[in-house]
Image (cartoon, helix red, strand yellow):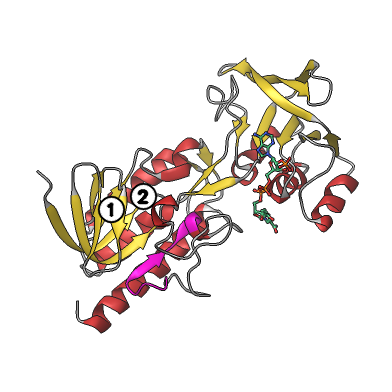
Amino acid sequence: MNSTSHHRVIILGSGPAGLTAAVYTARANLKPLIIHGPLPGGQLTTTTDVENYPGFPDGIMGPDLMQQMEQQAKRFGAETVVDTVTSVELKNRPFTLHSAGKSWSCDALIISTGASPRYLGIPGEKELLGYGVSTCATCDGAFFRNKRIMVVGGGDSACEEANFLTRFGERVFLVHRRDELRASKIMQERTLKNPKIEAVWNSIPVQILGTQTSGVTAVTLKDTKSGATREFPVDAVFVAIGHTPNSSLFKGVLPMDSNGYLTPAPNSTRMPVEGVFACGDVQDHVFRQAVTAAGTGCMAAIEAERWLEAKGL
Ligand code: NAP
C-alpha cells in the first residue's frame, strides 16, 4: 500500500551538501528526512583519500568522511531513507514526492542530488577507479608526483585538469577525440602553451590497462581517423568528459540552464517555487568541491528554516 508520511523538511541526496543541510536543519529541530538513492554519500564515496577537506590534517577516506557527516546529522535527529524518488509534485502544498512504493510530503524541499561525472565506459575504467583512474584532479592529482598522467577530454574541464596536474606530473597527455579543443580560447591557449602538456589528437581510449596492485600501467588508444590502436604507457588517467547534474526529476518543474544545472536566485539557494532550495553540485558547475557543496548545504538549511518560520510552518 502507498502510504504518505509528512515532514517539515525533506532533503534529497546525501552528499556533503545534503548532509550539511541535514546537520543544520536537525539542529534547528526540524527533524529532516534525507532520501538518498543508490549512492549514499554521493561522489566522495567513489574517491579514496580526501586531503583538501578542512579539519583533517592527515586526510580522510571519502567514504569515512561521508559516514561521519551522516552520524553527525543523525545525532541531532535527522532520519535517512534509501529509495529512488521518481516524481515530485511542487504545484500543491505540502509538496509530495513519490518512489515506486512510497510517498512523502514536506513543507520545504532541499535538493542536493549532486552531479555524476561522465565515464568513458571502457574496460578497465571501473575496475581501476581509485587505483589510477579518477574524475577529480583536485582530489587525486597529488598522488601522481613525477608520473605520466593522461587527461581525457577537450573541454574547459579537461584543460583545467591538465593544467592543474602539471603541478604534479612529469608529463601530462591531453587526449582528445578531435584535433581541435572545445574549451574556451583562453583555456586552449594556456593549455597548449604549457610545456608540460602534450596534446594527443584524434584519439580515444578503448581500454585501460593495469591491476589494483600495480595501478594503471597503460591505455590503449585508438586513432579516430585511421582506426589504428596503440598502447600508451601512463600511471594515471583523469576522465574529464563532463558532468551531468542529477536534475532530470525536475525537468519542466524547476528552471535549469542548458546543461541541466538548477538555477537558484543569485547568492542564494532559493528556487522560484517558494519553499524549494537547491544546493551542491546540482546547481554548481564552477567549483564542484565537497567544501563548497557543504557551504551551500548550510545556506539552504538556513534559508529553509527562515522560510518555514516566516510562513509559520
Ligand atoms: P564539455 O564542455 O561538455 O566538454 C566535454 C569534452 O569531452 C568535449 O571535448 C568532448 O569532445 C569530450 N567527450 C565527451 N564525451 C566523450 C567520450 N565519450 N569520449 C571522448 N571524449 C568525450 O564539458 P566540461 O569541460 O566539463 O565543461 C562543462 C561546462 O562547464 C562548459 O560550459 C564549460 O565551459 C564549463 N566549465 C567552465 C570552466 C571555467 O570556466 N573555468 C571550467 C570547467 C567547466 P567533443 O569536443 O568532441 O565533443
| Residue 16: percent from left, percent from top | 42, 53
Secondary structure category for the residue under label 2: loop
Say few, some or many: other residues with alpha carbon within 10 Å of mark 2 (under 14 / 14 to 19 / 20 or more): many
Residue 120, horizontal then vertical, whole percent: 61, 31
- Tell me where residue 249 appears, x and y as whole percent: 39, 52
Instruction: State the residue in front, 248 or 6.
Output: 248
Query: Would residue 41 be visible to someone looking at this image?
Result: yes
Q: 277 or 66: nearer the eye? A: 277
Identify which residue is drawn at 80% across, 54% down: 187
Placement of 29 over or under 141, stated as above or below = below
Q: Do labels 1 and 2 touch, CB within 8 Å?
A: yes
Disc 1 secondary structure class: strand
Q: CA distance from mark 1 to mark 2?
A: 7 Å
- Residue 283's place in the image compared with 123, above or below, is below
> N-terminal of the two: label 1 or label 2?
2
Q: Quadrant of the N terminus?
A: top left
Q: Where is residue 122, by image quadrant?
A: top right
Kindly identify the residue that appears in the image at 87 percent across and 45 percent down. Answer: 192
The amino acid pointed to by label 2 is Ser
Q: Residues within 10 Å of mark 1 (few under 14, many from 20)?
A: many
Numbered range of the magenta stretch:
271-282
For this view, does 90 lie left or right of residue 166? left
- Report the front residue among 142 and 12: 12
Please name the residue that numbered disc 1 is placed on.
34
Farthest-out residue, bottom? 310
Q: Which quarter shows the C terminus?
A: bottom left
Is residue 276 part of the magenta span, yes or no?
A: yes
Residue identifier under label 2: 14
